[in-house]
Amino acid sequence: QQKVQQSPESLIVPEGGMASLNCTSSDRNVDYFWWYRQHSGKSPKMLMSIFSNGEKEEGRFTVHLNKASLHTSLHIRDSQPSDSALYLCAAASSGSWQLIFGSGTQLTVMP
Amino acid sequence: EAAVTQSPRNKVAVTGGKVTLSCNQTNNHNNMYWYRQDTGHGLRLIHYSYGAGSTEKGDIPDGYKASRPSQENFSLILELATPSQTSVYFCASGDAGANSDYTFGSGTRLLVI
């Protein structure tokens, strides 16, 4: 079983809609989470990081974290076709700094 | 701007041959990572390093070695390449910390025939 599980595997939303992506770690030592976006043929680029319980917002992107359940979610409002990409969740513990990624969610925003 | 540079960008190798993938970072980051990316598997951690002279095994180290001779350079070595190692390989660097932006190189596309 992967240490970082993401769901759904793929997601299609209409332009202007809300996309919601999920990520859970099975490693109880994890302290920190990141969300990365990877456009086709490109390298991953960091979107947001979160390590405290609660919510963090940057523009159209909002990240939630529940440390008790080691669950984080990414919400993209007013989705644009340019948001179509592979979204990767990463997690690490302050003990080892092994940066472990999930399999990703492939988001498609339909014009 | 901080950068992570990988070489080569593309590589064709023969089965049983030796392959070295190179990564150079100008971020002065302590931590460096090697991943492979295959369809349906996201990024899988092969080896990582905390600094010059250190290498640690990640989740899928079998068939790979790593070398960190300096703060800036981190290599991934396939002593006996196999077709199953055909993949896209990414190097990343970052410092420990919640606000760290782990920066990725552009990737190396390896085909083992």
Image (cartoon, coloured by chain):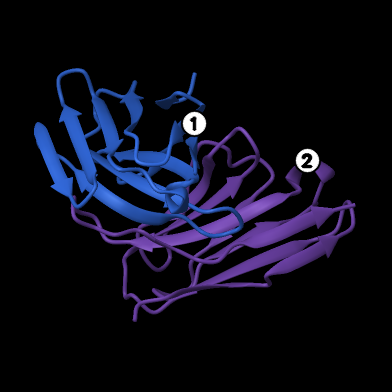
The amino acid on which the numbered mark 2 sits, given as a three-letter code, is Ser
Count of labels in the image: 2
A109 is higher (above) or lower (below) than A23: below
Residue at image x 44%, y 60%? B92
The amino acid on which the numbered mark 1 sits, given as a three-letter code, is Ile
Q: Position of residue B63 (x, y in %)?
A: 69, 44
Colour of chain A, in one word, is: blue
Q: Is residue A36 left or right of residue A111?
A: left
Residue at image x 49%, y 72%? B69
Q: Position of residue A66 (x, y in %)?
A: 16, 25
Q: Chain of mark 2?
A: B
Please check whether the numbered discs 1 and 2 fall on a single chain.
no
Task: State the residue position of label 1.
Answer: A12
Q: Position of residue A31 (x, y in %)?
A: 20, 36
Q: For mark 1, does the 10 Å Cα neighbourhood hold few (<14), some (14 to 19), or many (20 or more) residues?
A: few
Q: Position of residue B65 (x, y in %)?
A: 61, 53
Residue at image x 24%, y 29%? A29
Between circles 1 and 2, the one closer to the viewer is 1
Task: State the residue position of label 2.
Answer: B84
Nearer to us in this view, B29 or A23: A23
Spatial separation of the CA atoms under disc 1 and disc 2: 31 Å
Q: Is residue B69 left or right of residue B96?
A: right
Callout 2 secondary element: helix
Chain identifier matching the purple colour in the rendered picture:
B
